[in-house]
Amino acid sequence: MLDLATTKVHDEARQGEQFAPFTNDPNIYGKRFYIESYGCQMNFADSEVVAAILNKEGFGATRNVEEADLIFVNTCSIREKAEQTVRKRLTDFKRLKNEKPGTLIGVLGCMAERLKSKFLEEEKLVDIVVGPDAYRSLPRLVNEASDGQKSVNVLLSREETYADIAPVRLNSNGVSAFVSIMRGCNNMCSFCVVPFTRGRERSRDAASIIGECRDLFEQGYKEVTLLGQNVDSYHYISNDGTEADAVSFASLLEQVARISPELRVRFSTSHPKDITDDVLHTMAAYENICKCIHLPVQSGSTRVLQLMNRTYTREWYMKKVDRIREILPECSITTDIIAGFCTETNEDHQDTLSIMDYSNYVYGYMFYYSERPGTLAQRRYQDDIPLEVKKKRLQEIIEKQNQLSLNDYKKDVGQTYKVLIDGDSKRSSEQWVGRTSQNKVVIFPKQDNATHKKGDYVQVTINDCTQATLFGSIA
Ligand code: 5AD
Ligand code: SF4
């Protein structure tokens, strides 16, 4: 797989990523932990919080599962397939535990929350089960588990944002980092398990977010991505503040952008119903706020959108796209699409294909519907579209997206873009890989005698492309 853009929601290249040991860590640890992460960027950001909590308690990180005393899997429940992958990994770890009986295995994240203590009964090898709001209790749970007790904490919280914990950066290239700005989700999309696994929405203290971004910039980072399930509904009021002091997402975005014009700012994910003109105008006002919006459509049919409880119609979504094009003509739009939701007809499916044309997505995450236990859709509707039909529609959606991406990338040939260098290209240390403001990956040769390094901005003229990569040379 090519070097993927970093704000992708479920970056396939990162699934199962292990934690890198802290660089230049001089400490000697009594115990070492290994952590593997699945799911969305929020989950990867959470693993960085977990690493910080464990490290403070004297645990060191390892990338080598065989030398670990503690094995953690940070899990995802969004589709059945994600859960199956995790179960498979747990059986691999079971073998390790048989060889090294003192090893403790912990399940973290959304699947832990969904299955709770059932995990301990079903997967006999698991010692610790911790939900996304309970990571502060990890040191205690590890101690209890070391004494032979099975430990579970899956309490969800209305307040926890881990605001005061400085995450230990995972496998970072030192150029871009993720900063969590809120947790949970109050939207009740009928297909989605997230409100059940991550609880109610809450916004993190604005000052701690800005502080974290400033620290990152001072450490040499050049790009921050503000993360949340629904960033546009960010709304922070301090304990002693009133509604009049509330910080909105637009205002937070502006404050982060003002840290330095050299710091790029991205954000993900936006719910179409919540992204306001204020946010779009703020994006237009600051060159360093990247011109890229992830705007999941899910379906192009008003009838299906209603069943999904998305709270917008096809026409309303199209108007939002118009508004983005009006205020931000250079903005790329990416999306998420679900094929074969309950009762979806061929006509509904055609509506999805046509809204893709209308929105001209640069990239899409495309899935077929997977019924999740406990969701509104599971309780209310029958999962009545046969798997072959779901797969066929998904294939058509993927083909459409490939075509849209290729056409869009072709238009960039001949243009010159400001590119932030992420590092060496995977294929060759003689080439750089970087990204444009629109989050398109660009590969270009290093110049002889030039002093460029990763984290620098360079102007690159595009001379060729595929549907996922631009190729160019330094202008
Ligand atoms: N089945 C298929 N796709 C889903 N998503 C969320 N829940 C489901 C489900 N039950 C997709 C949505 C969402 C993305 C993160 O995952 O498109 O935006
Ligand atoms: Fe992220 Fe949702 Fe998967 Fe949880 S279930 S890891 S919130 S995508």
Image (cartoon, rainbow, N blue to C red):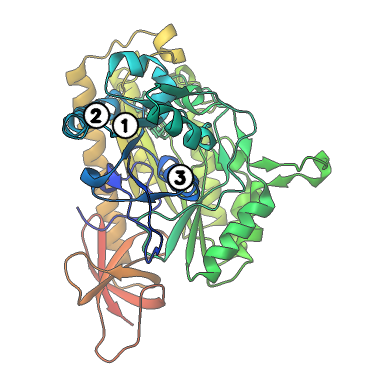
Q: Residues within 10 Å of mark 2 (few under 14, many from 20)?
A: many
Q: Nearer the viewer, residue 423 or 112?
A: 112
- Up-down: is 170 above or below 91? below
Please give the label number shown on residue 412: none
Residue contact at pointers 2 and 1, CB within 8 angstroms: yes
Rendered location of residue 175, percent (x, y): 42, 66
- Up-down: is 189 above or below 360? above
The answer to which of marks 2 and 1 sits earlier in the sequence is 2
Q: Kindly identify which residue carries mark 1.
A: 105
The answer to which of marks 2 and 3 sits earlier in the sequence is 3
In what quadrant does ligand 1 lie?
A: top left
Q: Kindly identify which residue carries mark 2.
A: 90
Give the mark toward the camera: 2 or 3.
3
Give the mark toward the camera: 2 or 1.
1
The answer to which of marks 1 and 3 sits earlier in the sequence is 3
Q: Kindly identify which residue carries mark 3.
A: 54
